[in-house]
Amino acid sequence: MKSMLLNRLLPLLALSLAATAQPVAFNLDPSQTQVHFRVDSTLHTVHGTFKLKSGAFRFDPATQSVSGAAVVDVASGDSGSHARDGRMHKEVLQSAKYPEAVFTVERLESPFALPAPNQEIHLAGSFSIHGAAHPMTLVIHTRSDAGKLIATTAFDVPYVAWGMKNPGNFLLKVDNIVHFEIDAVLQPAP
């Protein structure tokens, strides 16, 4: 009889604890966040980086709601070749006109619990780049490393389908998709 009563009370207790949990906010640390890209071509695979400008997210465990955005400095794109980067910024990204790429979270598509390490989180939102917003769901993996909360994700950007120019020519064939990998360090917001 006691175990039956306990089995009925435990879920109610867990729900009441979740309902009283306070919202938490995290900031992405730009100095410790890495945004890597890779695009294949007939000659070789191009690797490079972008810099994170800012990022902040707010999570409410009681309602399982999330909000926030991550902003990447498009003009910081660097593939290690001054000439290639000049073409990338002028002809493909048009970074003088579109200096930022922003992922804005709209909803959580998977349960999320605190503390956050060692979880897979599905964040649905929109990715704005080159003057247009595109729906996107990011699969975020979290882990704890040396006292830091690390979040990683990978996604593809079909840049040509999204209105950007392919830099290839009759000799050089460049893939129409850029692959991104992000390793972000999250810190509690004050």
Image (tube, rainbow, N blue to C red):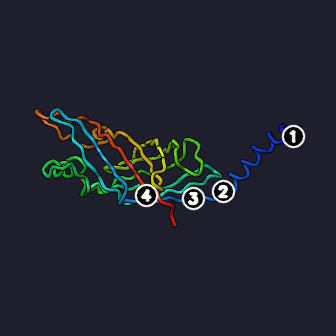
- Tell me the residue that label 2 is attached to: 21
Residue 163: percent from left, percent from top: 29, 42
Q: Earlier in the sequence, mark 3 or mark 1?
A: 1
| SS category of the residue bearing label 4 | strand
- Front one among 164 and 171: 171
Outermost right residue: 1
- Location of residue 69 by image quarter: bottom left
Mark 4 belongs to which amino acid?
Leu
| Distance (Cα) linking label 3 and label 2 | 9 Å
| SS category of the residue bearing label 2 | loop
Q: Earlier in the sequence, mark 1 or mark 4?
A: 1
- Tell me the residue that label 1 is attached to: 2
Outermost bottom residue: 190
| Placement of 43 over or under 134, stated as above or below | above
Q: Which mark is residue 28?
A: 4
Q: Are marks 4 and 2 in contact (CB under 8 Å)?
A: no
Pointer 1: residues within 10 angstroms few (<14), some, or many (20+)? few
Mark 2 belongs to which amino acid?
Ala
| Distance (Cα) linking label 2 and label 1 | 28 Å
Q: Are marks 3 and 2 in contact (CB under 8 Å)?
A: no
Q: Residue at x 60, y 54 (%)?
A: 60
Q: Give the quadrant of the N terminus.
A: top right
Mark 3 belongs to which amino acid?
Val
| Distance (Cα) linking label 1 and label 4 | 47 Å
Mark 1 belongs to which amino acid?
Lys
- Tell me the residue that label 3 is attached to: 24
In this rendering, the label closer to the viewer, 1 or 4: 1
Q: Residue at x 25, y 47 (%)?
A: 48
